[in-house]
Image (tube, grey):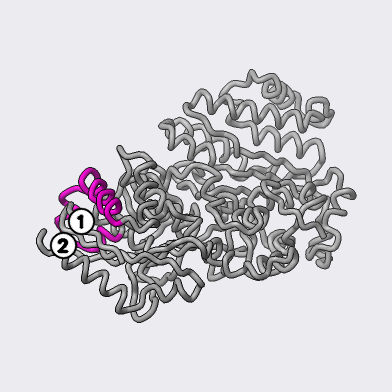
Amino acid sequence: MHTTMPVGVDDFAKLREKYYLVDKTLFLCDFLKYHAEVTLFTRPRRFGKTLTMSMLRYFLDIDHAAENRKLFVDLQVADDVETMALQGTRPILFFSLRGCKALDWQAMRGLIGKNLQGLVQQYRFLLTSEHVDAADRVSLQALYEARADDATLKNALVIFLRMLAAHYGRQPVLLLDEYDVPVQSAWESGYYAEAIDFFRVFYTTALKTNQYLDFAVLTGVMRIAKESIFSDLNNLDVDSVLSPKFPEAFGFTSEEVKKLAEDIGCAAKLPEVRAWYDGYRFAGKEIYNPWSVIKYFDRHCVPDTYWVNTSGNAILAELMKSTDREHFEHVEDLMQGRTVQGFLREGVIYSDIGEDQDALYTMLCTTGYLTVAHAERVAGEMEYMLCLPNREMQTLFGIEIVKRYQKGFGKSPLVALMRAMLQGDAIHVQLGLADYLEKMASTFDTTKGKESFYHGFVLGMTAILVPDYDVRSNRESGYGRYDLAAIPLEKQHPGFVLEFKVATNEGALESKAREALQQIDERDYDNEFHAQGIEKVWHYGIAFYGKQVQVLKA
């Protein structure tokens, strides 16, 4: 058994050769017996979609069937005689749009043409096949020479499928990976309408009542609205995070993570892995983020925000940008471990994100930033309670909150503020908080006199301490619930407990700060620290009045 972690490996044959494999081949048994004409799997990025498509490709591909069969020896699928009878029986057209990201439509069109040119190189034998239509051969040659017109580009997939069917004498299977990447890129860069116009034809001609197609599998992060891209496609079966038929096909189950940890001698790290990377719920099934789990074990069990660093977070940034004060309190609720309500609907349109809060929550859920804690039917419609799945997502939300609050500051003042807090320097903590409040917090926010605003304000700042610190909010310790605590992962480092109060006038600031400090001591809020062997714990009582702040330390 190989124990090297397959970081970034999404080719099934390469993974089988020298990397640790989490056996997901039971998916082949279930899917190949009950698949639809066209199946779209939507899951968050880095949840194993491309590897699953690669597994399907190697299993079904009629070329190199005997060689590929060896890849599945000793795996779970090998015990299913009915499924193994399908191995090596289909022509396969595999096309990925993962790298199709561009700043404008002309650049995107060039990328699509380049990728199709590469596809022709893989199937070059079709250019000389005596079984294919001469006109299709001319179109394929145009794609190969990068001189195809728009009509040929839009119909490229159906041309390939028709030629493969003619060459092999049987219908091929289409595997279309990351189908929505170019559409999201178009949305982010401002040419969404042009992209939709192209891909509506590109996909529909290949997938709708195509006599040359056996069946198709598509993967992506989101289900783009049928009305905008899958026009009149009535044979599409969507398997998503909200309604999965195969909930354990993507991501790791708790049993798979437990086995992985035991196999590589890291079973003692399971509680930490669970806290950081578990928490997703697909049809009630507990699912871990597979990319982060693999990176965690590859990096010698050091927790970090591995998944959130793999690409941009435009949708989450849009949440922060378009959210008003009322809705921003929902973000603060999420950061503090609470749930928010949403009526989610699949098949939203990107342009709805900034205008419709439910559309935005739908995208945050399907893209992996939020997960469903509970769902029930209300007045004929599904109501969802959403939450952050784990500490990794809590950290990312904190980073985005920090960005909202640090405009015009940069990172250095925030680092200095947190350093002062960890050194017990109450004077500079007070100065730093006052500076942020003066320049960043609007009078509308602060004159409400709501402790939740200040709580969320400081909570967002402390996200910069992760992953060296476990930042916790509103947790039980001793004889009550502290407001905010930063617990060091290394016992020799100091930690701190914060208790917030809101004064009714400027003259009451100091007494309120003392009241907060006394509460920390009387209710033994640092009990949690001492239980973990952490001796140095700073106590801060912090009182706010408008944009004024008083900080006392013990």
The answer, for residue 386, to whether it is visible in the render is: no
Marks 2 & 1, CB-CB < 8 Å contact: yes
**Predominant SS along the magenta part:** helix
| Disc 2 residue crowd, few under 14, some 14–19, many 20+, Cα 10 Å | many
Spatial CA distance of label 2 from label 1 is: 7 Å
Q: In this view, does 417 lie above or below 514?
A: above
- Determine the image quadrant of residue 292: bottom right
Q: Which residue is at a point 77% across and 53% down the rendered structure image?
A: 19
Give the residue type at disc 1.
Answer: Val
x and y percentages locating residue 122 in the rendered image: 76, 32
Q: Is residue 144 above or below residue 284?
A: above
Label 2's element?
Answer: helix
Q: Does the magenta stretch include residue 518?
A: no
Start and end of the magenta stretch? Answer: 426-455
Q: Which residue is at a point 71% across and 32% down the rendered structure image?
A: 119
Give the residue type at disc 2.
Answer: Leu
x and y percentages locating residue 86 in the rendered image: 81, 56
Q: How many marks?
A: 2
Query: First in sequence: mark 2 or mark 1?
Result: 2
x and y percentages locating residue 138 in the rendered image: 72, 21
The answer, for residue 534, to whether it is visible in the render is: yes
Label 1's element?
Answer: strand
26 or 51: nearer the viewer: 51
For disc 1, the marked residue is 549
Q: Taking 227 as reference, is 233 left or right?
A: right
For disc 2, the marked residue is 509
Q: Taking 406 as reference, is 528 left or right?
A: right
Q: Quadrant of the C terminus?
A: bottom left
